[in-house]
Image: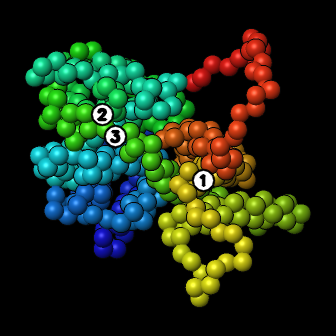
Amino acid sequence: MDDTGLDRIAQFARQEIGPYLAAHPEDRYPLPLVRRLAQLGAFGAAVPTQHGGGDWSRRDIALIGYELGRGWQPLAGLVSTHLKLCRQVSEHGTPQQRERWLGAMARGESVFARAYHEQGIAHPAQLRTRAIRRGRVAVLDGRKSWVTNARNADRVLVIARSGNAAVGVLVDPGRPGVTIGPELPRPGLLGVSLAEIAFADYEFDPEDDVLGGWDHDLTQSLLANDVTSYTARAVGSADAVLEHAVRFVRDGLAHRSADVQGAIRLRMGELAAKVAVMRTVWHALLDPRPPADGTPPEAPNPPMTSAVAKVFCTATLQDVVREAATLCGGAGYAAADHALGRHYRDALALPIIGAPNDVLLSRIGERELGPVAADSHATTPTPTPATTSKAT
């Protein structure tokens, strides 16, 4: 990738998204912005050059998420999802599928969504959506929750069970057998659709329409979920929020008394410190370099993982947007420039989308603890109505 491509996307995010949102309802699909990103090559960043893409590095793709996260999280989510699917088609698709789809995906002519999540399901082996072969055709039945860009995607990669495999079915959402539910109400992440999709006897070609061919198992790919994009989006949002707060507070600081100025500087220092640590975590994730002189560090220095980075940065962003809104007072809560409020509402979703932070923390804890021997004397208490919880 040449720096010019990323520079143009950064310029777009910082100069065009704000004016667009000031002139259009936040819950309207941002087709003009999507078309601009296609012109800038953002949709082809993860596509190999032989298929018309840019074949950008992992770091540069993360920087797309950062820049769009600074501007508007729903747009960042749409592009990040599409780029993940570009990579999956490139890695798992048959030669015919790569030839058919990657060029159109790179140009933004075919924007993809993914339908994977089912409420209460934590592992691909537990999916209830089924793909069943019936001679020369196959059928898809099931229901998917929380599908980003459900209403405007040209194709939806639906993850379903086929025997012991988790397969990806390339679904045309305009064909019979697909029902897109109503828009899911939510406080933020507006503009880009979020809805359930149901499949009832949706017929498809068992070879051409299954990523990699019939029974090509995506389980390991799904379990090795890279959540780097969510960290990038969180850090981008935090940087934009800090800049907004600094600009607002600086303009009015001279009119405050000396003791109030001291308190504001202290709060601003706390805010800046949190954002600085978020940036450090993100850079450690993208560029895990050894010490410059090649000597081992004195303290243990385990590599940063995308799971740890996502948990920390998306959780810390909640503090950042809340403290920035407090610093800005009424102008942070209700103002003509509604960027801070938008960042606040959109940030609420980041700990639970992609892979929920609680799930990631459980995996991190499991890795730290290792295998635990069963205690033959341990007993399992009988759940009571007060202690029984329902999985969500």
Q: Nearer the viewer, residue 137 or 107?
A: 137
Q: Is residue 39 visible?
A: yes
Q: Are marks 1 and 3 in contact (CB under 8 Å)?
A: no
The residue labelled by disc 2 is 167
Residue 318 seen from this side: no
Q: Residue at x 38, y 56 (%)?
A: 16
Quarter where residue 124 is shown:
top left
Q: Is residue 16 left or right of residue 332?
A: left
Residue at (34%, 36%) from the top-left corner? 114
| Rendered-image quadrant of the C terminus | top right
Give the amino acid type for the residue marked by disc 3 in the picture.
Leu
Position of 104 relative to 386 (above/below):
below
Give the amino acid at mark 1.
Val
Q: Dot 3 corresponds to which residue?
A: 218
Report which residue position mark 1 lands on.
308
Q: Position of residue 31 (x, y in %)?
A: 29, 42
Describe the element under mark 3 as helix, strand or loop.
Answer: loop
Would you call the spot at circle 3 few (<14 residues within 10 Å), some (14-19), or many (20 or more)? some
Q: Position of residue 368 (x, y in %)?
A: 67, 50
